């Protein structure tokens, strides 16, 4: 299992350090943790996580290692600071910052080329689900976002139905199972069927156990419930 904490635009460096100090997990659980702090808090998190076995990444990484790209994060710098992951295509990046699949495909490639693991977020909106388009949306996102994907290098997929993010509306186990099984089947086509598939969208200690039992759920991408040490630690106790 992978337990990824997406802290979005929350936490100062001091708050980040305090969270990590108070996170009491077994070494095995700690090795399953990935923290995505804001770019400003990377150094604080990288230092605080040293020797714990947990990993960290950035919430957004650009398609180049360096250059005149004001405001962007260099994946090469992430690598040099000891980071492991780049979150790519989170629905907030897609909706609020207008990131398109063509750009996301290049982000996947750049992260992989630098030895970082892309954690690619995909998922349908409520309108798409209600129109019966969920699986075709997923298919299209995978096709476009994995255009330059190298199956010899690691990848993580996070299925996050947009309507379940930050809303308290968690997808049912039936809905999650259907989509995860479908993603697994589609990944065969990319020679990447071993790719971990995480679920994200209002994951809480109360629903983590049930969702974690599903065959093709390999962990969670957690927003709100990852901001409090207690709720995050409870989720990290989920066993397969
Ligand atoms: P949530 O966020 O757990 O608050 O729904 C998940 C995410 O945005 O990745």
Image (cartoon, helix red, strand yellow):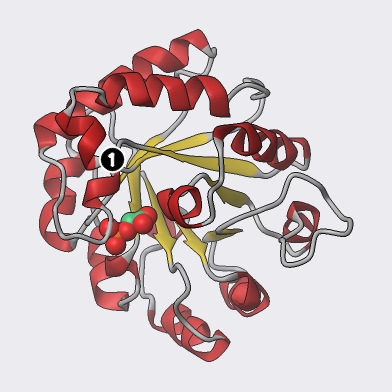
Query: Measuring 36% from the left and 13% from the top, which residue is drawn there?
Result: 185
Residue 128 visible in the shown view:
yes
Q: Is residue 163 left or right of residue 67?
A: left
For disc 1, the marked residue is 125
Residue lying at 74% horizontally and 53% vertically, measured from the top left: 75
Apparent side of residue 191 relative to residue 103 in the rendered image (left or right): left
Residue 200 placed where, x, y %?
Answer: 31, 48
Quadrant of the drawing holding the N terminus? top left
Q: Is residue 237 above or below residue 114?
A: below
- Could you say which is closer to the camera, residue 196 or residue 168? 168
Residue 221 rendering spot, x and y as whole percentages: 36, 52
Q: Secondary structure at mark 1?
A: loop
Percent x, y of residue 36: 51, 62
Q: Between residues 2 and 188, which one lies in front from this camera angle? A: 188
Relative side of 110 to 136, left or right = right
Where is 176 relative to 68, above or below? above
Query: Is residue 214 visible in the rendered structure shown here?
Result: no
């Amino acid at each position: 299992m992978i337990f990824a904490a997406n802290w979005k635009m929350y936490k100062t460096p001091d708050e980040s350090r305090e969270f990590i100090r108070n996170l009491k997990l077994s070494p095995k659980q700690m090795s399953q943790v990935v923290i995505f702090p804001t770019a400003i808090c990377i150094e604080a998190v990288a230092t605080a996580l040293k020797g714990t076995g947990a990993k960290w990444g950035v919430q957004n990484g650009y398609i180049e290692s360096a250059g005149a790209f004001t405001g962007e994060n260099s994946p090469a710098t992430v690598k040099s600071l000891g980071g492991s992951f780049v979150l790519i295509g989170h629905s907030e990046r897609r909706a609020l910052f207008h990131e398109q699949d063509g750009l996301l495909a290049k982000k996947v490639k750049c992260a992989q080329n630098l030895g970082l693991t892309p954690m690619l977020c995909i998922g349908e909106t409520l309108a798409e689900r209600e129109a019966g388009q969920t699986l075709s949306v997923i298919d299209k996102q995978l096709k476009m976002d994995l255009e330059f994907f190298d199956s010899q290098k690691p990848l993580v997929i996070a299925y996050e139905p947009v309507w379940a993010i930050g809303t308290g509306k968690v997808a049912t186990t039936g809905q999650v199972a259907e989509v995860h099984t479908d993603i697994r089947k589609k990944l065969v086509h990319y020679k990447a069927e071993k790719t971990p598939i995480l679920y994200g969208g209002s994951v809480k200690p109360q629903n983590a156990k049930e969702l974690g039992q599903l065959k093709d759920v390999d962990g969670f991408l957690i927003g709100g419930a990852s901001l409090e040490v207690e709720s995050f630690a409870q989720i990290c106790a989920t066993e397969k």
